[in-house]
Image (cartoon, helix red, strand yellow):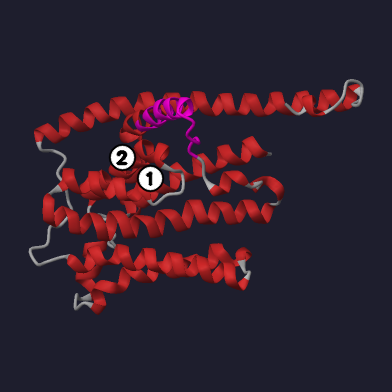
Amino acid sequence: GQLALYEVGELSKTETDAIVEGTLAKFMLLALLMFVLIGLVLIGVVLGIVAIVLIAKGTIRPKMQRFSKPTAAFAEVLGIFLALFVLIQLGIGLLGIEEAAPIVIWLTLGAAFWPLVRGWSWKETCDGLGWTTGRGFFVEIGAGLVGYLALLPLVAIGLLATIVVTLIGAGLGLEPPTHPVAEGDPSSSITKILLLFLLASVWAPVVEETIFRGALFHHLHAAIGVAGAALISGFIFAVIHPQGVLGVPALTTIGVCFALLRYWRGSLIASVTAHAVHNTFLITLLVILTS
């Protein structure tokens, strides 16, 4: 593709060789990452089978609390979050401070404190949001890593579903799923790369998990149980993302997986860890592809 941009003879042999060698190096790195991913999915299949057996035996039991009192305040957190997100985006655009967006966007986390305003105690709010250390901070991180591996086959199925509907949608003239960060050039500077990782690998895991697997899933779980709560919260999580309707199957599946981690551990640390690992891998691929 790069060579096709030039007329025949416009590039020297040295310049042509440099383009080819750079492309081959990128291809080999991507191929290595794909082989690693396939290996992790196979490990995930084994871990998933083990988990199912342990769940059937009662060895693995969910640790998430189910409150007896009405949890509407936690459902309202989502609405406040979306309102803050829109207002912040409008403010950033009006003030022309796009470069500050990765920092200012953290203000949306303020929505999580709404239950305090509605009369919930600090402990009840933290328990409802999953802001607890569970069995220990590092234990929960480990649970998030192992749980993410065990759920990788489901993530892969969701990605395959999105690929299928994208191919069908292409025949109908629909745009393939994309994301605003993929439309720029994240490799243009170290600062942009760092800000991109800050947004995708820190802000999104912390804030989105707090809102969707913390507040929303907590409310839905109390109202309709784990299966419906995981599916509905995962679907809402998917449709508010900018990837479009064709990206919904993959994002819903990912959201359901993170919800299951929250349900299993009670603490939000496991799902935050899984979310961070997932996004970091995707952004790393994006940076490689655009470098």
Other-residue count near label 2 (Cα within 10 Å), few / some / many at <14 / 14–19 / ≥20: many
- Residue 68 position, x and y percent, is 7, 63
- Rendered view: 28 above or below 143: above
Report which residue position mark 2 lands on.
Answer: 147
The answer to whether any part of residue 141 appears in the image is no
Residue kind at label 1, given as amino acid type: Ala
Report which residue position mark 1 lands on.
Answer: 274
In what element is the residue under mark 2?
A: helix
In what element is the residue under mark 1?
A: helix
- Rendered view: 142 above or below 56: below
Q: Quadrant of residue 38?
A: top left
Write the residue at 12% across / 55% down: 223
Disc 1 and disc 2 in contact, CB within 8 angstroms: yes
Residue 164 is inside the magenta segment: yes
Left or right side of 156 for 193 = right
Residue kind at label 2, given as amino acid type: Gly
